[in-house]
Amino acid sequence: MLAGCRHDDVIFIPEHVDVSRPSYTGIKGFFVLNEGNMGTNKATLDYYNYTSGRYSRNIFGAANPGVAKEMGDVGNDLAIYGNRLYAVINCSNKVDVMDRMSVKKIGQVDIPNCRNIRFHGRYAYVTSYAGPVQIDRDYKQLGYVAKVDTATLEVVDRCIVGFQPDGLEIAGGYIYVANSGGYMVPNYENTISVIDIATFKEVERVPIAINLNHVLADDRGVLWVSSRGNYVDTSARLYAYDTRKRRVVKTIDIPVASMAMSGDSLYVISSQWSNIEMEASPAQFLIVNTASMQVVNNQFIADGSQADIERPYGIAVNPITGDIIIADARNYVTPGTLFYYNKDGALQWQVRTGDIPAHIAFLGE
């Protein structure tokens, strides 16, 4: 809600709404990072409390009244590690670090064009495009992964990777980084960078497919990697890369807009943007079994309510109950909607969010 201006900066007023009955899941609640449209400084943070059934919007500003521009420009990733909540704010070139209970800002880490975050030991690892937001087929600036000391919030090292690195995953002592080359249309990157955590050196760059985006590891040492294709004549696909065999062992012809892992199930919002049609394909809501490497459910929403979801943009699964959360960006410029399903795919409730809800982090005990 736009309430006024503070030196030309948007001020968001916190809002609270009861959306469900209280429940106990072993998880206190979850945070939702709303991206906000690029250039608007409208990234916001929401929170759902399981024990009260209350959804609260725009909580960062209330907890941090002295922070100019509130969260900033484009919230790109969100994670809880230890007692802290980390929000990657892409175009504001920073990672905000907050107390996970009060959401009071503890500090920030300055990283240019930062994208995604993962943790191992005392360190956070953050992908960075390193250069400006600029479409250029001859883009010269390689990206890197920043190694951040979570005690001091200082960048202690950088590892150069490919162009425009997006998702990253940590498995078996290595960091796997999906290099997209997204600014270099049509000269996309097609590799995953492999970084040895012990030495923090890139040891290999593995070709997978062009314009890589998400990467998640299952319990068998297999990375599930999404390619966005070129939006024209090269289709988006999902790849299973076996880190022990060091090769792609399965290709599934489905586009991946967003995905979340829960046990042997990979939940996928399947949709692809087309630069020919200038719109996204109708979304499917799929489950891939990571053991059999097959699509085992072509529609995990069981009650027909998928017809009410305009632009499914983010997905998360409660690790205890199996409940499914889908974030709908609607038209990308006005508030979105959060749809909350039980594990059987029946809608339990829905609620208005900030602009472009996308990233979800569960708060444990």
Image (spheres, grey):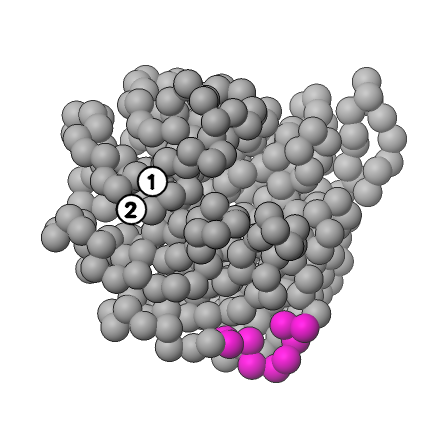
Nearer the observer, 195 or 276: 276
Tell me what residue is drawn at x 39 percent, y 25 percent. Answer: 143
Tag 1: amino acid? Asn
45 within the magenta span: no
Nearer the observer, 185 or 13: 185
Q: Is residue 325 above or below residue 304?
A: above
Which residue is situated farthest in the bottom direction here? 303
**Residue with the mark numbered 2:** 208
Instruction: Answer left or right for 184 relative to 247.
Output: right
Q: Quadrant of the C terminus?
A: bottom left
Q: Secondary structure at mark 2?
A: loop
Q: Which residues are magenta?
A: 299-307
Residue 137 point in image, percent of width and height: 48, 27
Is most of the magenta stretch helix, strand or loop? loop
Q: Is residue 303 above or below residue 132?
A: below
Residue 46 point in image, percent of width and height: 65, 47
**Residue with the mark numbered 1:** 190
Nearer the observer, 300 or 86: 300
Q: Secondary structure at mark 1?
A: loop
Tell me what residue is drawn at x 50 percent, y 75 percent. Answer: 300
Residue 279 point in image, percent of width and height: 65, 54
Image quadrant in which you'd find residue 194? top left
